[in-house]
Amino acid sequence: MNIIILTQSYYPDTVSVSQHLTDFSESLVKSGHNVTVLTSSFGYDSEQKFAKNDLQNGVKIRRIWQTNFGKEIFILRSVNFLTFNLSLLYVGLLIKKSEVDLVFGSTSPPFSGLVGLILSKIKQTPFYYWVLDLQPELSIASGLLSKNSLMAKLFSFFGSYLIKSSTRIISLDRFMTRYLIEKGADRSKIKELPVWPVSEGQYIGGRDENQFRIEANFNKRIVIMFSGNHAHVHSLSTLLLAAKTLRSNDDILFAFVGGGVRKQDVSNFKFENSLDNITQHPFQPRSSFHISIAASDIQVVILGNGLVGFTHPNKIYGAMFLRKPILYIGPKESHATDILEEIPGNILVEHDDVDLLVEKITIFSKLSLNQIKEIGDANYTYAKNNFNPDVLLKEMIDFVEEYE
């Protein structure tokens, strides 16, 4: 098949959606399909501009123009989405109908899926929709958009139309599936499939020999790490307040790795409270991602209140696959708690319960390194049995090929 994939982020970008779509696209090529990716010219969290045309492991990459005003101001960010989607539609229309057998889109950026649906109707091909998160639900729940605003109602209308009209849909968890059905999706068209860990390797070596740990001066401290995109949906306040409460505990360090719109919130909190127990580090390339994760003692996974079913923090899979204990902050019922409640030793707390979080972090910090390793090993075993990348990618490919 000739498959067109639409996405804002793709290789060599390092954000999660880029890495997962890169894996998926290259797996499609290995399965004998011709794949063209239409994506942005700009890095997700940088001013870096990539080559207009590229070929990566058999995947043809075409990068298109868009504005790049940054992500701090909601209106300007919306302009970025609008110009990207308009360019996406224009470039997609130029592709010959005979060169398209299937259009595959995701929710990054918002409503690029709608462009995919329009293109599929014009080209008379199926449209497959990979739901990684939902808009305007996330923006409303995060307080970025008023539920009763004209924009929210307009986005909701188009979002529902997209869900009802897609040929097939990939959902990430049971909560998302339930919401999609409520919005009008046909259950028989939905494939429920979590994303896979994206690390390129396992860290082999001792804790004190870890290069990232050495360069970051973590020393002997217990490192609590939040790694990845600092998005609006990741409410960091409970974690930051715990760091403030534990400021006098020299055995514990809070490390924030990555970027995004909330990165400045961390910087401001650290500065305003003169906290030496918070460190910040840039996004890590996929090739060394496993090394930075290995430098931590426990990995943080955050899911905002009211966001269950609308988004699906997937860093839990990578951290478990890299043998790390998990510190989960979020609602009692979610895809993360479905997993972690089956494995002892991980930390689960709700937002705003700072005292409980401080207590659990303190207890964790007193565990021996062997006890911490046992928790991480149990997580790895669970992840290997349930989130094997080869198995999940094959299921994705099989799902696409069902309509070949």
Image: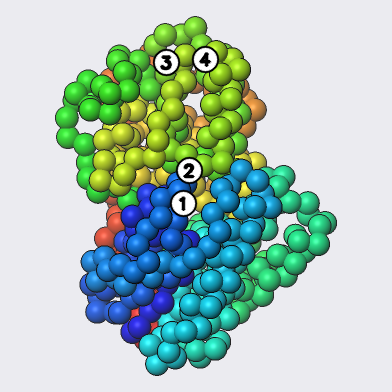
Vertical comparison of 76 with 262: above or below? below
In contact (CB < 8 Å): disc 2 and disc 3: no
Q: Which residue is mark 3?
A: 252
Percent from the top left, x then y, of residue 89?
54, 76
Disc 2 is placed on an element classified as loop
Residue 25 located left or right of residue 225: left
* Mark earlier in primary sequence (4, 2): 2
* Residue 389 figure quarter: bottom left
Of residues 236 and 95, the one nearer the viewer is: 95
* Residue 96 figure quarter: bottom left
Give the numbered dot on residue 229: 2
Between marks 1 and 4, how big is the CA–CA gap?
A: 29 Å
* Mark earlier in primary sequence (1, 4): 1
Of residues 59 and 380, the one nearer the viewer is: 59
Q: Residue at x 22, y 20 (%)?
A: 208
Q: Which residue is mark 4?
A: 275
The amino acid marked with disc number 2 is Asn
Between marks 4 and 2, how big is the CA–CA gap?
A: 22 Å
Residue 351 located left or right of residue 389: right
Badge 3, how many Cα within 10 Å: few under 14, some, many 20+? many
* Mark earlier in primary sequence (3, 1): 1
* Mark earlier in primary sequence (2, 1): 1
The amino acid marked with disc number 3 is Ile
Percent from the top left, x then y, of residue 48?
41, 50
Give the numbered dot on residue 44: 1
Between marks 3 and 1, how big is the CA–CA gap?
A: 31 Å
In contact (CB < 8 Å): disc 2 and disc 1: yes
Disc 4 is placed on an element classified as loop
* Residue 269 figure quarter: top right
